[in-house]
Image: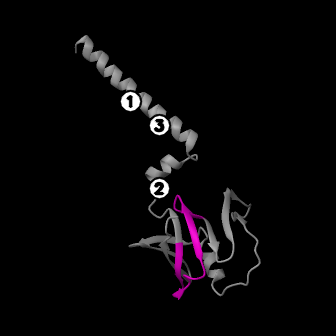
Amino acid sequence: MRRGQHHRALAWLIAGGLGVAAVTVLSALFLPSDSLWHAVAAPEEDGTWQFTTIDGRDVGSIGYNVHIRWGEVVAGHDGCNNWGVDGGDVIDNSDRIITIDLQECSPGPLDEAYWLLTQPTATMRREGEQLILHDEPHRGQLRRAAER
């Protein structure tokens, strides 16, 4: 390798390293902690999903939804209140700590089923464009919520 070629290769290597460093610094400054990695490697289930049915009953008008992050249900709307898992904290008995709005609402006939389907014990799978949450004896069908 001639002397000029060596310097050119070294310059490209340094420029590439500086480019990677710039992207890393900018993403750390302007994006939430794992947004860049999440954008690249997130499971296809991640995002907000609207319940269409629970146990075969149409619940589209109730407004049940969940938000999934890294393949786990972390937030949602139970038809009355918004809620979210509080930073991954866990109570001594392994229950999640949940932060929730506290509006007083009449209980719906499928509220209990909704809450059971949001628990970590529920299984999650894709069926085409739908997401299925299942926790015996309940089954929920969901569609991806429209982007706002």
Give the alpha-carbon distance from disc 1 to disc 2, as whole Å.
26 Å
- Verify whether residue 63 appears in magenta: yes
Number of marks in the rendered image: 3
Q: Are marks 1 and 2 in contact (CB under 8 Å)?
A: no
> Residue shown at 54%/77% (left/top)?
51
Q: Is residue 6 above or below residue 84?
A: above
Q: Is residue 28 above or below residue 14?
A: below
Q: Residue 13 placed where, x, y %? A: 36, 25
Q: Where does label 3 land, which residue?
A: 23
Q: Which residues are magenta?
A: 50-74
Q: Where does label 2 land, which residue?
A: 42
For disc 2, the neighbor class at 10 Å (few under 14, some 14 to 19, many from 20) is: some
Seen from the viewer's position, the closer of residues 43 and 35 is 35
For badge 2, the amino acid type reads: Ala
Q: Earlier in the sequence, mark 1 or mark 2?
A: 1
Q: Are marks 3 and 2 in contact (CB under 8 Å)?
A: no
Seen from the viewer's position, the closer of residues 53 and 94 is 53
Q: Main secondary structure of the magenta part?
A: strand
Per the rendering, the mark at residue 16 is 1
Q: Residue 127 placed where, x, y %? A: 40, 74
Q: Residue 71 placed where, x, y %? A: 51, 62
For badge 3, the amino acid type reads: Val
Q: Earlier in the sequence, mark 1 or mark 3?
A: 1
Give the alpha-carbon distance from disc 3 to disc 2, as whole Å.
19 Å
Quadrant for the N terminus in the image: top left
